[in-house]
Image (cartoon, helix red, strand yellow):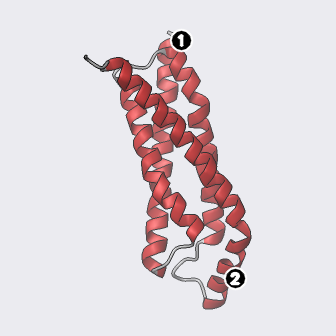
Amino acid sequence: MAEALAAVGIVASIVQLVDFGTKLLRRLDEFHSNLDDIPTSFQHIKSQLPLLLENLKSTQQDVDAGIIKPETERALQPTINGCRTQIGSLNSILDKELPSPYDSRANKTKKAISSIFRDKRIEKITSTLGSYIQTLTFYHTAVRSTLNPLKG
């Protein structure tokens, strides 16, 4: 029973995180299309987020297929929670930094200038998400190698 609850917990976390991450990626795409240019710090996030989302979807498929043991689910949960925290932080920054198409020129300029001061924080989030991507990628590589051992 506890194992089933753990599986439901990790799947719910992943589903929520993929949804949240997809919305965030959509906002970045929208921002990019409206302004033709996106700050470098957001470009890194925009390039890493799709890989993170694919890793999470793959993890969810493994849980659904019963490939992941309950202890592995528990071990992955902090990584998934960490991803959620970082994406939430990034979303908060985007709320403050991304100008809307309806913002005045002065407001857009103000947001552009203030974004310079948030670059370090965004770089830290990018770095942390990169480390979570590495963790999930390593996990998937390990799982695949045990499911499909080399034949020689």
How packed mark 2 is, by other alpha carbons closer than 10 Å (few <14, some 14-19, many 20 or more), is: few
Q: Which amino acid type is shown beneath numbered disc 1?
A: Ala
On the image, the x and y values in percent for residue 129 come to 58, 47
Secondary element type, mark 1:
helix
* Residue hosting label 1: 2
Q: Which amino acid type is shown beneath numbered disc 2?
A: Lys
Going by the image, does 92 lie left or right of 16? right
Residue sitting at x 50%, y 49%: 20
Secondary element type, mark 2:
helix
Q: Residue furthest front?
A: 152
How many numbered discs? 2
* Residue hosting label 2: 110
N-terminal-most mark, 1 or 2: 1
On the image, the x and y values in percent for residue 34 come to 45, 79
Front residue of 120/19: it is 120
On the image, the x and y values in percent for residue 136 come to 49, 35
| Above-or-below relation of 56 to 122 | above
Going by the image, does 84 lie left or right of 48? right
